[in-house]
Image: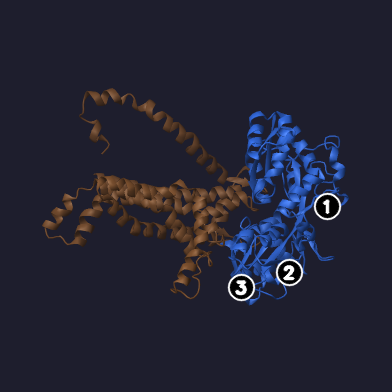
Amino acid sequence: MKNLLKTGASALALSLMATVATAEGKLSIYHWFEYIPQELLDKFAAEYDVEVTLDTYDSNEALLAALKAGKLGQYDVAVPGDYMVEIMGKEGMLDTFTDDEMPLKGNILPQWMDVGFDPGRKSSIPYQWGSTSFSVNRDVYSGDIQTTDIIFNPPEELKGKINVLDTAGETLTLASIHLGIPQCTTDREQLKALNDLVQNAKQYWASFGSDVAKDVLVSGDAAAGMIWNGFGMKAREEGANIEYAYPAQGYIVWMDNVVLLKDAPNRENALKFMNFLLEPENAAAVTNYARYTAGVKGVEPFLEEAVKSAPELNPPAGGNPQFVQACDEEVQKVYDTIWTNLKK
Amino acid sequence: MAGGLGQGTGKSARTYAGLGVPLILPAWLIIGIFLVVPILIMLVYSFLTKEFRGGVIWEPTLAAYDQFFFDRGLFGDEPPKIEWTYILIFWRSIWQAGLATVLCLLIGFPTAWFIATRPPNSRTIWLFLITVPYWVNLLIRTISMKFLIRDNGPLNQWLLDAGLISEPIHVINTATAVQLGLFYSYLPFMVLPIYAAVERYNFALSEAAADLYASRWVTLTQVIIPSVKPGIIAGCILVFVPSLGAFLAPDLLGGAKNFMIGSLIEEQFKGAAGNWPFGAAAAMILLTMVLIVLIFYARSQARGAR
């Protein structure tokens, strides 16, 4: 059966059915929406004879909440962002693997190897990295967009036509960057200024939405919108005349990572899958699909031309990229109050 | 009311009476396990201490309810004032749900009346048409409505092409869009119970009223509405209650700009706040409100039956 599948002549649907019917093992993935091509899952399923299931979430916090609410032990791998890897590690939700169990670990790019959120990569491997800022519709506004004023103090043309991400983490972090205050600050004046800023900016915002961030730009519901760089590139490729900004004040960078979850029901297959994603060809397939950047060596030959030259994926030198920080409880409580006040 | 059939029908009623308990048992078990137990868990959680980033610590506290009713400032150390934030959010939900109920009643009653007064075989077709949208998931229907009403969507396009408007009507991401979504989603819940009531209505009563020189208005208010009142009340509850907890319409059509009760509770579990006890407390307060409405209904029913 395995050989038959590997000859690859059978139609995709057929091979999928055959895999399901005969799979020797299972793999349960908890992943972001629209972030992995089905073909890649099918390829893994066929190569390793594993039945793959995929559930999705739309924010790091939603992932954490689901795992806390009892889904730990149900999934093998998940794909949290940098700061969430650290939080999940502290919560004891991650399993570790040895270097022997991850033969392709050497494929990880050196700068993504010894990361603060998982020193030495004991529980995670890089998935993709990218940035969060915003895209602006150039038919509506032709002025300078390399400033966070676009979101927080917008020009007349963009007022009332802005979508912001519906997650306190990213939106309040970009607001902090706009004000030039440190993340997780405990300074009361700075926190008040943050509160005042978003309270005032809300009048310019049409909507809050994360999973719809691309759709609102493509459909024209929003003329400017906070978005992740790859998602913004997809929106541009779907026909929106938009440009992604790397604002002078700074922008958010992040790395999503495949983590081995504690109590994974199919630990073996999880490790196989993580190794599989460290193969340059497969990492490149994710990049070609999701339009972000891989953290693996040797992907270039497999990348589409559009990805290599995309302005969204080539940040200008210098700039002020910032990782989102996980605040402590005291500050997080103030952030929560600011967010609730904002949406009341 | 309950005794109507059982009493005085003699032997057969007694024969079947013994079957009652085993027959009702599965329903009781399902309600007990999947409704009562979760509500009890929620009640307990609402009195527990919040764990940072979701979860609870098993120490009893009133902190969740305190947060709901008292405002202690941005940093939580000011003297307590009345917290208006959540009252505002609840009021917004109640207002939206109430308006949706009234609109559904205004459109639903004539619709139900129309269907119930058709010949019996065409009634089936009308009822079928009412239920057709329910074959499609609510999420899909809400997103479809978003496509229809957006600024450059087909509705605005047709109106522009027809020269009826010169600028697109801006509805998306407003409270009006939320209202439209609620009204559309729950309209059949109003039509069906009223239809069931009107169908049982004895139209000879209307004729009798007319024969006694009652005007059409008097016939409607004094004869018809009292007769079909149970259907109207059932319809109102079926629209009001789910509207109160709705979060799809506020999120997708309202642009998630303002919390409704449903999205506020969702945020406590799914969002960065991760405040489960507060989410549970807000849900308990919502549940209490709904129960008050239902008790009010039950009492008015009991009075009607007497």
- Determine if marks 3 and 1 fall on one subunit: yes
Quadrant (top left, top right, bottom left, bottom right) of the N terminus of chain B: top left
**Residue B168 horizontal side relative to residue A34, left or right:** left
Q: Which residue is mark 1?
A: A300
Residue at 63% x, 30% y: name it: A21
Q: Which residue is mark 3?
A: A159
Task: Give the letter of the chain under mark 3.
Answer: A
In the image, B172 versus B10, the foreground residue is B172
Q: Residues within 10 Å of mark 2 (few under 14, many from 20)?
A: some
Of labels 3 and 1, the one closer to you = 1
Q: Which residue is mark 2?
A: A179
Q: In x, y percent, where is residue A309?
A: 79, 61
Task: Give the letter of the chain under mark 1.
Answer: A
Amino acid at dot 1: Glu
Task: Identify whether A143 is placed above or below B225.
Answer: below
**Residue B9 horizontal side relative to residue A244, left or right:** left
Of labels 1 and 2, the one closer to you = 1
> Which shade of the palette goes to chain B?
brown
**Residue B268 visible in the picture:** yes
Q: In x, y percent, where is residue A321?
A: 79, 62
